[in-house]
């Protein structure tokens, strides 16, 4: 079998695995999200997994209720040309100040994105690793924001083997497993020293759109018709886009 055809087979099996194991979680996430939107909540994406903040945002056929949480954390660490001599750096404990600063920035960023209790944050991180990654989840929960997490449970469990607080999925109201293997790359190929062809981006795309589809269905059951974008290249597309912007601003969905 060619490497290309092996890739296609892996993608098909990935879709089947997600559908068979994560369907219930996707439906629960959709019900929670639709309830939030029905009560005036806003749906945000924060993506550390490389894809979703582009894939689900402002797409033809996609709903206007998908919003991106913009996040540009100021850096307190030394940059090129700014570092002090090592003797001074070694004698200075930046950790406490850096972490306090980052926590305050994360909360401020959520406020600046107009996020409040009852909103939904769809948070995609393949590994769930990193202090800022966990701090975002912790801060969302502290502010009363509903947290939907897409991650890889096997990687979370390895990273948090000795500390449950390091497992991102533990903070979620609902979590969905992307079902990739720990390490992401799916294929061992004799022509490469490392495994190749990561599945997390592909998995995130079809989990994300399944979640959006289920949310639209849940909204429809509540009598809510979400604003959906038409392709700007279609007949009447530019005009419809302006109407969509206006409708979303008036209704919030």
Image (spheres, rainbow, N blue to C red):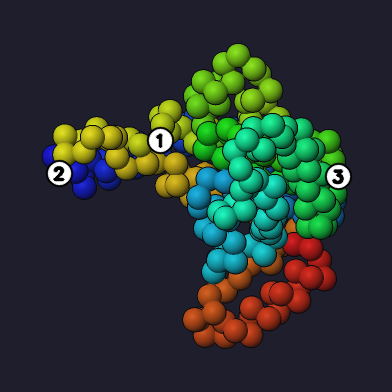
Name the front one of labels 3 and 1: 1
Decide: few, some or many residues near mark 2? Use Cα within 10 Å; few <14, some 14-19, many ≥20: few
Q: Which residue is mark 3?
A: 117
- The residue sitting at the top extreme is 162
Q: Residue at x 45, y 47 (%)?
A: 201
Which numbered tag is attached to residue 184?
A: 1
Q: Earlier in the sequence, mark 1 or mark 2?
A: 2
Residue 130 on image: x %, y %: 61, 34
In the displayed structure image, the side of residue 43 where residue 207 appears, left or right: left
Query: Do the CB atoms of the residues marked 1 and 2 lie less than 8 Å apart?
Result: no
Instruction: Using the rendered image of the protein, determine whether residue 147 is visible from the camera's viewpoint.
Output: no
Q: Please give the name of the residue rendered at 53% of the width and 45% of the height, measured from the top-left corner.
A: 49
Where disc 2 sits, the SS reads loop
Towards the viewer: 150 or 17: 150
Q: Which mark is residue 2?
A: 2
If you read the primary sequence from the N terminus, does the residue marked by circle 2 or circle 3 appear first? 2
Viewer-nearest of discs 1 and 2: 1
The quadrant of the image that shows the N terminus is: top left
Q: Is residue 74 above or below residue 244?
A: above
Q: Are marks 3 and 1 in contact (CB under 8 Å)?
A: no
Q: Quadrant of residue 68?
A: bottom right
In the image, residue 125 sits, relative to residue 165, either above or below, namely below
Q: Image quadrant for the C terminus?
A: bottom right
Residue 152 x, y percent position in the rendering: 51, 32
Asked which secondary structure carries label 1, the reply is loop
Give the quarter of the image for residue 229: bottom right
Sequence order check: which comes first, mark 3 or mark 1? 3
Instruction: Give the residue furthest to the left.
Output: 1
């Amino acid at each position: 079998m060619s490497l290309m055809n092996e890739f296609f087979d892996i993608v098909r099996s990935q879709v089947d695995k997600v559908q068979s194991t994560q369907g219930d979680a996707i439906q629960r996430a959709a019900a929670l999200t639709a309830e939030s939107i029905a009560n005036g909540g806003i749906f945000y994406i924060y993506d550390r997994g490389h894809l979703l903040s582009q894939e689900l945002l402002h797409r033809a056929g996609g709903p206007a209720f998908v919003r991106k949480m913009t996040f540009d954390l100021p850096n307190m660490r030394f940059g090129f040309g700014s570092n002090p001599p090592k003797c001074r750096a070694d004698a200075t404990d930046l950790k406490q100040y850096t972490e306090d600063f980052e926590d305050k920035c994360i909360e401020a960023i959520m406020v600046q994105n107009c996020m409040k209790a009852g909103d939904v944050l769809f948070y995609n991180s393949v590994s769930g690793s990193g202090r800022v990654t966990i701090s975002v989840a912790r801060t969302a929960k502290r502010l009363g924001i509903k947290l939907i997490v897409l991650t890889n449970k096997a990687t979370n469990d390895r990273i948090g083997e000795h500390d449950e607080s390091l497992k991102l999925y533990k903070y979620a109201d609902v979590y969905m497993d992307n079902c990739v293997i720990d390490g992401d790359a799916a294929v061992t190929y004799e022509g490469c020293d490392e495994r190749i062809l990561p599945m997390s981006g592909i998995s995130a795309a079809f989990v994300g759109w399944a979640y959006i589809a289920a949310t639209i269905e849940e909204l429809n059951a509540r009598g809510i018709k979400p604003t959906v974008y038409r392709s700007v290249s279609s007949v009447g597309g530019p005009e419809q886009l302006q109407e969509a912007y206006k409708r979303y601003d008036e209704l919030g969905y």
